[in-house]
């Protein structure tokens, strides 16, 4: 009993000192801790269409299929071959653990007691796709030629629109007598419609982007990673996570792989890691097929495991050390200067330059100049191999006000405000009494 009391006193000392320190605070959570919406229905998505991929395999020759897989967009074909197990619950909980930030093209989730970022940088590391900046990313200039019109007619698609997944699937079964180039074009369009845009099977794709396929080399080298990332983030940011079910456009499976790298222990236990870690990193896990685990509980379990480490870091920062060899006895020593508050994490814009590089001068709705390196609060995980995604996690040596500390600070502020108001009221009452007596 005495040991429990001493531990409680020690925790109170740490908590009160943390409140008094000039600690950097994170943006608020999107949902209150413990009140995140449950995953009632699985997240729906349109990417990785089974019928489309079957048509591609049935109608392309073995050589054509291998050429497509060896191309710069072949990572999607390889991903399909993994038979990746989609785990909707895990992705849903990650989305619900988000911090409420203003960046359009960043997602920060508070997992394992630390904020983890998903941005264009992480997307590029995971997929290996070309994410370079290009002017007019979503509206490239492409002249309509007679050759293009003839190819669109073969696909039975209006020249003013891009082909849908449904139209491309049907075209595969009518392409036996097409030229090798046209068959390769159809294969590229299948990847574009089925994975990069990943919209409803009957929805038309962007005509200006689809037209790039007439130049096979130009199409392969286009920054499709940047396009895919923007499609995904635009869809995610528009979703109401409190709904019982919702549908996400784009390649949402990448978020599940990102979760495995953000939480290595969870990835090792539930992600079915592939030996020797293939490259790119998107291909390093087979996912959680046929698993119905409580991922929220698994994530919370990892949080509990790291709470002790976080408390040790805070204790060192405020100068609490063990005395007399007993973990229950603490004493205060000199403290180091606390870190200065940091601003909200920066990001790399989608239609802008990369972090730390010169931004595009042309105004754009999707340009958000910022730098992920200007924030001293976050630091890359140095213990990870160089080919790991640049997941930015909070430095464990920098204490951060937790939800408990923030709530305690608010309570103290309200208490102090109430006392100030009470004193003012008392002074006014005494002044009125003195005035009445003078008359």
Image (cartoon, rainbow, N blue to C red):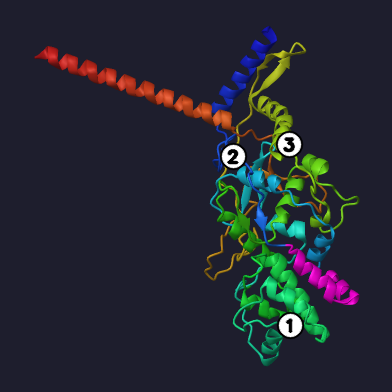
How much space separates mark 3 and mark 1, taking CA atoms? 48 Å
411 sits to left or right of 133: left
Give the main secondary structure, helix, strand or loop, of the magenta stretch.
Answer: helix
Residue depicted at x 72% and y 55%: 253
Q: Is residue 263 above or below residue 313?
A: below
Residue depicted at x 56% and y 41%: 29
Q: Which residue is more in the foreground, 320 or 108?
A: 108
Please name the residue that numbered disc 1 is placed on: 215
Please name the residue that numbered disc 3 is placed on: 298
Graded by Cα atoms within 10 Å as few (under 14), some (14 to 19) or many (20 or more), the crowding at tag 3 reads some
Identify the disc placed on residue 36.
2
How much space separates mark 1 and mark 2, taking CA atoms? 47 Å
How much space separates mark 2 and mark 3, taking CA atoms? 15 Å
Kind of element beneath mark 1 = loop
Residue depicted at x 17% and y 14%: 434
Graded by Cα atoms within 10 Å as few (under 14), some (14 to 19) or many (20 or more), the crowding at tag 2 reads some
């Amino acid at each position: 009993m005495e040991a429990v009391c001493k531990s409680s006193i020690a925790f109170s000392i740490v908590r009160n000192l943390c409140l008094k320190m000039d600690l950097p605070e994170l943006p608020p959570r999107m949902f209150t801790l413990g009140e995140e919406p449950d995953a009632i229905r699985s997240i729906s998505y349109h990417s990785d269409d089974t019928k489309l991929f079957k048509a591609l395999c049935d109608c392309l020759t073995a050589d054509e299929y291998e050429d497509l897989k060896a191309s710069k967009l072949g990572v999607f074909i390889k991903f399909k071959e993994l038979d990746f197990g989609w785990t909707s619950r895990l992705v849903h909980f990650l989305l619900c653990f988000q911090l409420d930030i203003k960046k359009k093209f960043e997602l920060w989730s508070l997992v394992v007691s630390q904020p983890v970022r998903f941005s264009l940088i992480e997307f590029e590391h995971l997929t290996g796709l070309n994410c370079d900046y290009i002017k007019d990313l979503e509206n490239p200039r492409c002249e309509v030629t007679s050759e293009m019109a003839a190819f669109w007619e073969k696909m039975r698609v209006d020249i003013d629109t891009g082909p849908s997944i449904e139209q491309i699937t049907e075209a595969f079964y009518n392409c036996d007598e097409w030229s090798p180039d046209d068959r390769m074009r159809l294969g590229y369009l299948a990847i574009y419609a089925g994975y990069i845009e990943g919209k409803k099977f009957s929805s038309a794709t962007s005509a200006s982007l689809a037209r790039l396929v007439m130049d096979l080399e130009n199409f392969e080298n286009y920054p499709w990673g940047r396009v895919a990332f923007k499609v995904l983030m635009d869809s995610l940011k528009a979703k109401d996570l409190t709904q019982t079910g919702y549908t996400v456009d784009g390649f949402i499976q990448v978020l599940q792989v990102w979760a495995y790298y953000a939480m290595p222990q969870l990835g090792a236990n539930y992600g079915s890691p592939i030996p020797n870690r293939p490259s790119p990193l998107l291909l390093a896990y087979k996912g959680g097929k046929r698993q119905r685990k409580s991922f929220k509980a698994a994530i919370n379990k990892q949080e509990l495991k790291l709470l002790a480490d976080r408390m040790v870091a805070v204790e060192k920062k405020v100068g609490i050390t063990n005395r007399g060899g007993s973990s229950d006895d603490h004493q205060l020593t000199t403290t180091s200067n606390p870190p200065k508050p940091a601003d909200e994490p920066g990001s790399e814009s989608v239609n802008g330059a990369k972090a730390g590089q010169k931004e595009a001068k042309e105004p754009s709705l999707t340009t958000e100049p910022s730098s992920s390196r200007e924030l001293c609060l976050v630091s890359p995980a140095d213990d990870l191999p160089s080919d790991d995604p640049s997941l930015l996690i909070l430095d464990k040596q920098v204490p951060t006000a937790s939800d408990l500390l923030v709530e305690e600070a608010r309570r103290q502020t309200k208490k102090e405000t109430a006392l100030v108001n009470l004193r003012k009221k008392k002074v006014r009452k005494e002044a009125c009494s003195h005035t009445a007596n003078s008359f």
